Amino acid sequence: MKRKHIVGNWKMNGSAVVIDDVLDQLLKQTLPADVSVCVPSPYLQRAGERLAGSSLRLGAQNVSEHGDGAYTGEVSARMLRDVGCHLAIIGHSERRRYFAETDESVMNKLARLLEVGLFGVVCVGETLAERDGGRAEAKIESQLAQLHTLMARGATPKRFCVAYEPIWAIGTGRAASLEQIAQMHEFIKRCLGASYAVLYGGSVKAVNAADILALSAVDGVLVGGASLDAKEFGEICRAAS
Ligand code: PGA
């Protein structure tokens, strides 16, 4: 069986003390999966130094769609690589909602990551109104459409994966049902190709992780709130085996 990917998304939480503590606790555990932690950008360098030589991978939560230059406040893909990142989350629904990210900017960001050899975790997901209106698949298909341009230019399954995160399941304690997850993951694999990994995100906790990860179309999980608790995150990682 392929190893599953477990990605923690700490969002805009934590402090130097908290981050050191969570990473130290994670480093003491045996984690039978490919595990990454996406920390807030001011702490990337610090986290990278702590994780050096370990199997835990460092990730960012965003990247600029521009290359280095006069873009005040932005962080380029090259800079992320420089401080030890392996991957970056892009197009998270919070960034689409609060920072006006579009499918086009997500594609540009993925292109920047690929240019410097970083892995992209591209988030997609529908609102509750879209699901209730029977438009969930159409929404996801439209969010994936731009990726085909990059796939034609060599963005293979080794370069990026998709995280299916229904917006109504994020931070609500109400994860999608196993049936909804399986259906959408199979749909995404039909859109992109079966070898592209698809992670599920949205209220993944230690109590539901094993059932979600046991689904054959689920290649891993993207964990928000529960990833800042090293004990719970460790349990989620062990549920992958
Ligand atoms: P959650 O967040 O696990 O807290 O629901 C997931 C995410 O936003 O990536």
Image (cartoon, rainbow, N blue to C red):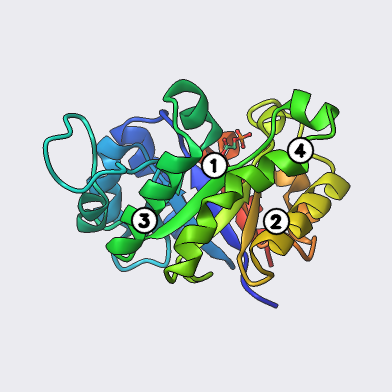
* Sequence order check, earlier mark of 3 and 1: 3
- Identified by mark 3, the residue type is Ala
- Identified by mark 4, the residue type is Ala
The label on residue 61 is none
Residue 201 in sight here: no
Q: Nearer the viewer, residue 56 or 123?
A: 123
Q: CA distance from mark 3 to mark 2?
A: 20 Å
Q: Secondary structure at mark 3?
A: helix
Contact (Cβ within 8 Å) of mark 4 with mark 1: no
Question: Is the residue indicated by label 1 positioned so its CB lies within 8 Å of ligand 1?
Answer: yes
Reading the image, the residue beneath label 2 is 188
Reading the image, the residue beneath label 4 is 136
Which is closer to the viewer, label 4 or label 1? Answer: 4
Percent across and percent down for residue 11 are 45, 33
Bin the neighbour count of mark 3 within 10 Å (Cα to Cα): few under 14, some 14-19, many 20 and up: many
Reading the image, the residue beneath label 1 is 227
Q: CA distance from mark 3 to mark 1?
A: 27 Å
- Identified by mark 2, the residue type is Ile
Where on the picture, by quarter, is residue 197? bottom right
Q: CA distance from mark 3 to mark 4?
A: 26 Å
Which is closer to the viewer, label 1 or label 2? Answer: 2
Contact (Cβ within 8 Å) of mark 3 with mark 4: no
* Sequence order check, earlier mark of 2 and 4: 4
Q: Nearer the viewer, residue 45 or 188?
A: 188
Bin the neighbour count of mark 1 within 10 Å (Cα to Cα): few under 14, some 14-19, many 20 and up: many
